[in-house]
Amino acid sequence: MRILIADKFPDGGRTDLLECGFEIVYDPDLKDEALTAAIKSSGADILVVRGTKVTAEMLEAGRLSLVVRAGAGYNTIDVKTASSRGIYVTNCPGKNSIAVAELAFGLMLSLDRRIPDNVNDLRQGRWNKKEYSKAPGIFGRTLGLIGVGRIGQEMISRAKAFGMPVVAWSRSLDLERAEKLGIDMKQSPLEVASASDVVSIHVALNNDTKNLIDEKFFAAMKPGSYFINTSRAEVVDQAALARAVTERGLRAGLDVFAGEPTGGVGSVEDGIFKIDGVIGTHHIGASTDQAQQAIAQETVRIIREYKDKGRAPNVVNLAKKTPATHLLVVRHFDRVGVLANVFDQLKGAGINVEETENIVFDGAAAAVARIQLDSAPSDSVLDAIKSNSQDIIELSLLKL
């Protein structure tokens, strides 16, 4: 198999892939049309990216069967097109959780102690201890979390170390889990906003979370409270955030923002960072050596398992529910052509197979095939399947 790596990837990870017998084309600067051309010319089976955008044109350009996002999110990949072409899309969830939580707390402390302003004044030769001695502190202040996945859970443990009580909302959070985590569950994002001194966002970007943090959310936050976003820019209505900072005295620490450049270097035109009370970093939440090494190891594991088993772990674009309505269970002798006959009969009846598995018993004399179908075979089709093979022991049809 040939792998095209179109983003920076640790040397150790590339060495591990070479030792597994893969061919590697490594060009971390590939983007846009150049990446489309490289996918086609390289004949790559597998594409590895980090933040690089993967478009429908790219997915249609070559013979890709697997795209690995060497990170947690996958919103930069055209998953719909990948699914339509039978291309697995996988990611590396949780491997950067600690790094993101560390940065979120760094932003929180920077807002509270105005660290960037301190540094800037010192570099300009200004001494202003009188001004910068004023800080609320974060001990005893309530941290509100929107999202309690792996990153959110890392936030909880760090908040406890800082002496911060935690309130949280997540669609997956219930009272039992909240009790185990030692946090106070809220029923809505607005309840978190009104109960918190600091709010930190840790949700994936999808149709449900786009602009989740809106004008109403910021209106519910306490004047002068802190807002941290290290998840995705599209989760937040940035215009509403800007108004909340200027009109209600909120302070914001952002690792992601609406006007973010797509490349590794460039210029920033977005005006959000010209507003007093807003600080930012360069979308570096996952960018520690520790996190990148963990992600590289997970990427290697995904690709190796795909090579060995033909199916990758962490796939994000498999159907949660297929169009299957019935399950045909075929108990049969494990001999050549038995299932081929079954599939021929189904094809002749215009019945589509959605999923199938064949479970072989000890000794390989018999097996059971479980075949999910998009409609029920008639009695005549079932009779034809039985009568055309002496190797079928029993048939049963179940409605799903």
Image: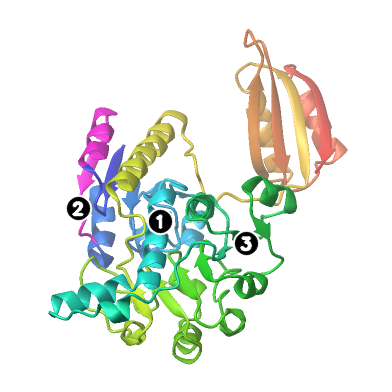
Report, in whole angstroms, how far the alpha carbon at label 2 lies from the one at label 1.
26 Å
Q: What amino acid is found at the position of numbered circle 1 in the picture?
A: Val
362 lies left or right of 381:
left
Label 1: which residue?
Answer: 100
Element type where label 1 sits in the image: helix
Magenta region: 11-30
* Of the two numbered discs 2 and 1 in the rendering, the one whose residue sits closer to the viewer: 1
Question: Residue 98 at x, y = what percent?
Answer: 41, 49
Report, in whole angstroms, how far the alpha carbon at label 1 lies from the one at label 3.
19 Å
Q: Quadrant of residue 111?
A: bottom left
Q: Which mark is residue 167?
A: 3
Looking at the image, the residue that sits furthest to the bottom is 247
Q: Which residue occupies the foreground of this view, 208 or 43?
A: 208
Label 2: which residue?
Answer: 27
Q: Which residue occupies the foreground of this view, 124 or 327?
A: 124
Q: Residue at x 43, y 35 (%)?
A: 306
Q: How is the image coloured?
A: rainbow
Report, in whole angstroms, how far the alpha carbon at label 3 lies from the one at label 2.
44 Å
The vertical placement of 165 against 46, above or below, is below
Residue 23 on the magenta segment: yes
Q: What amino acid is found at the position of numbered circle 2 in the picture?
A: Asp
